[in-house]
Image: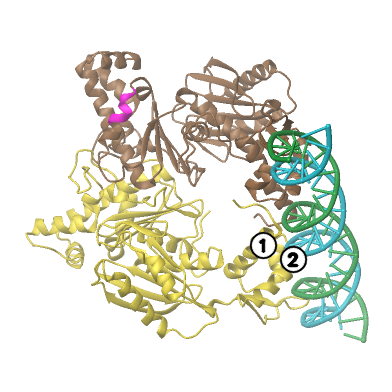
Chain colours: A yellow, B brown, C green, D cyan
Amino acid sequence: MVTGSKELIRDINTHLVLETVLNEGPVSRAAIAAKLGLTKATVSAIVAGLLEEQMVREIESEPASIGRRPILLEFCRENGRILSIDLGVNTIVAFTSDLTGNDCGLQQYRNTYTRDTVIKGLAGIIKKTMNRLEKTPFGVVGICIGIHGTVHENEITFAPYYDYAHLPFAKELSEKFGVPVYLENEANLSVVGEKSFCFHAKDLIGISVHSGIGVGIIADGTLYTGAKGNAGEFGHTIVEARGRQCPCGNQGCLEQYASERAILQDYAKAVGAKSVSIDRLIADYNANDPVALTMLDRFVRYIAVGINNLVNTFDPEIVVINSGFTIYIPDLTERIFAELKNRMNDCRIVPSGLQDTSILLGGVCVCIHHFLGVDYLSPNNPLTVG
Amino acid sequence: MVTGSKELIRDINTHLVLETVLNEGPVSRAAIAAKLGLTKATVSAIVAGLLEEQMVREIESEPASIGRRPILLEFCRENGRILSIDLGVNTIVAFTSDLTGNDCGLQQYRNTYTRDTVIKGLAGIIKKTMNRLEKTPFGVVGICIGIHGTVHENEITFAPYYDYAHLPFAKELSEKFGVPVYLENEANLSVVGEKSFCFHAKDLIGISVHSGIGVGIIADGTLYTGAKGNAGEFGHTIVEARGRQCPCGNQGCLEQYASERAILQDYAKAVGAKSVSIDRLIADYNANDPVALTMLDRFVRYIAVGINNLVNTFDPEIVVINSGFTIYIPDLTERIFAELKNRMNDCRIVPSGLQDTSILLGGVCVCIHHFLGVDYLSPNNPLTVG
DNA sequence: TGATTTAGTTTACTAACTAAACAAATGGGT
DNA sequence: ACCCATTTGTTTAGTTAGTAAACTAAATCA
């Protein structure tokens, strides 16, 4: 229960000031006051606190207009580090950044860990990564681990591709390193990353097509994860009521038609191979191989059905597609858009702006959000909507 | 932009106190203070204001325990009236209630209005209804109009069944009567009603099956209507990728298989009639007529597909089904539940608790919410979740 | 050099909170 | 019967974070 108190007011206003410096800085006290409708006195008091905490610093300003030159305030982005880990099925990627996502190093590891060794293994990777970092005033302020499975209350509740459900990742790692540890589903992280670094929209869906198909949902500006963290299990929505059998027990799940795995398996079968790589399929497609064309036609058709269903239930401003196929064959996104026939298609359908870094940058956003209490909106890519 | 100010503190706390009296009253100042973590002094000051505004009143309490007997506070539910209108395609229903939804009268009218006459017609109905009401301190505090179509920013943006899009309902009626007028989609109102009067859940989906199929979405406790108010157009999600042609331009929309209209048309065709009423189909089903059984089997199968898709994308706590079929054939809901085969089915699937009053009571909730700034949770039906 | 303009600080005041003392009302024990 | 313990609600004094307005600081321009 959040009751009103003086502290709450100061808290709200401090976060608004910090948000302004972070997302619109460098900026003067006077400009902040004008933007937020606070008095200069109040902003000065709040800024004094932020300066002391080393969250912002004062910098010189260029002579601009008449009058006293403002003292510009800048967010101290390099005063801390964030660790964002993608715990993939075969690969673990560890990315470190400053407090706004700027690259401070990236390492890849093979994921050879079993249920019994994975926490220790991750601890080793985190330790090695942290040792490599230069000292900063705040140190590492958060660790986010992207999970290929569902997460509820910071715990893996279901993960079909590895046996890590219900392990005490967050508890053990946060105790060991004295740093908060956040687990989150990879599709959710992807859409958070796309939102903060590319598409500054309030209602946004990210669709991640890999082995399975998952979506992340930003509704009214915040990530929606459902009552038990299972929102976005989009691969198991049904698009052919009496279609292909799915291991989940139903028939006709989208995943059976449009996932990378399904398409590649079908292609392998069609060309009589045991398995086919995504690179081979894309090469064949670009060489106008008729079977490859058919396979990706089907991808386009079924992903379009999926997006139609998302758009008709959610009405987002943008749907971001992140898949190997659309990354390497850019015109697929336009073909998917062209398939959408009904009146709802004033929704934008776009390819991922972050591609294979969306999960990592989404993790950075989760840590920023917890550390600062503020949503970070990168100014680098001004694809704002609304 | 909501910046913190002294007034904001009082505003937050006043709404919390009012919410406590409304949803847990009658209750003493001391109990409110204990619940909210405020001091008795603060609660007394706030209550003094609410007493003066005639929002709450003091009542005697029964001797309960040792110590001074508390003065109980009760919400003044009868100090105002709410007008909730269901603007149907063939019928207009006007419902009046006190400030917590208690029935103060209901009238039905035939909807014979064209685009040119509908606002005047509604104004006549509203006038007649308001004349019939007894005087109350606040009078009518809000009018909500349930729309069978999509609504965005209090305006009808699309309505396939009647030609009322983009008419200035809210502006003209609110000016004429001096009362705020709210438009909202009927499926959205339904789920709001179910949430407040029956299922006190935070993540809830209501699926309304009539001529078309719409859903209302409560995400994290608030109604989600999408970027442009088109969320919940669930009838046009595709469940058979190369299925029946739909007037929307796509093939295989759910509405072509599971809407009342589709089922009744198919049944008429199967029995060689021009049209068949829902009562006839239900009677035949109850008489074990094999064709009627087949028709409702299909309804069950396709609605289950739709619900599967909702559950896998949204992960709600509860899905509430409101349709003529499930109202009159109670075991259909269980059969739908039984069709759901994958692991997500720890979600509850329940029949509507409000049935044909859900739209009207949802409209009441919208008005309460705007008038009091508080969500009303009726204590009558304690089906709380979570 | 001084007028004008803009930035940031200081001062006096106010609203709304808290803590703690106080007043009021009631049941129970002796 | 009467006093005490207990609980409710009010009063009082003090704190915090806001506002408005005066003031100081630093810059441009004529």
Dominant secondary structure of the magenta stretch? helix
Image quarter in which the C terminus of chain B is found: top left
Image quarter in which the N terminus of chain B is found: bottom right
Q: Mark 2 lies on which chain?
A: A
Q: What residue type is labelled 2?
A: Thr
Which residue is at the front of the view, A269 or B320? B320
Query: Residue A245: image x %, image y %?
Result: 17, 45
Task: Report helix, strand or loop for mark 1.
Answer: helix
- Earlier-in-chain disc, 1 versus 2: 1
Structural crowding at the residue carrying mark 1, measured as other residues with C-alpha within 10 Å and reported as few (<14), some (14–19) or many (≥20): many
Tag shown at residue A13: 1
State if disc 2 and disc 1 touch (CB < 8 Å). yes
Query: Residue B201: image x %, image y %?
Result: 47, 40
Q: On screen, B40 above or below A66? A: above
* First to last magenta residue range: B330-335
Which residue is at the front of the view, B207 or B212? B207
Q: Could you tell me how many numbered marks the image carries?
A: 2
In this orientation, does residue A28 appear? no
Please give the name of the residue rendered at 35% of the width and 25% of the height, measured from the top-left corner. Answer: B326
Please give the name of the residue rendered at 36% of the width and 51% of the height, measured from the top-left corner. Answer: A232
In this orientation, does residue A212 appear? yes
Q: What residue type is labelled 1?
A: Asn
Q: On screen, B235 above or below B312? A: above
State the residue position of label 2. A42
**Rendering quarter of residue C21:** bottom right
Q: Does the magenta stretch include residue B62?
A: no
Q: On screen, A164 above or below B31? A: below
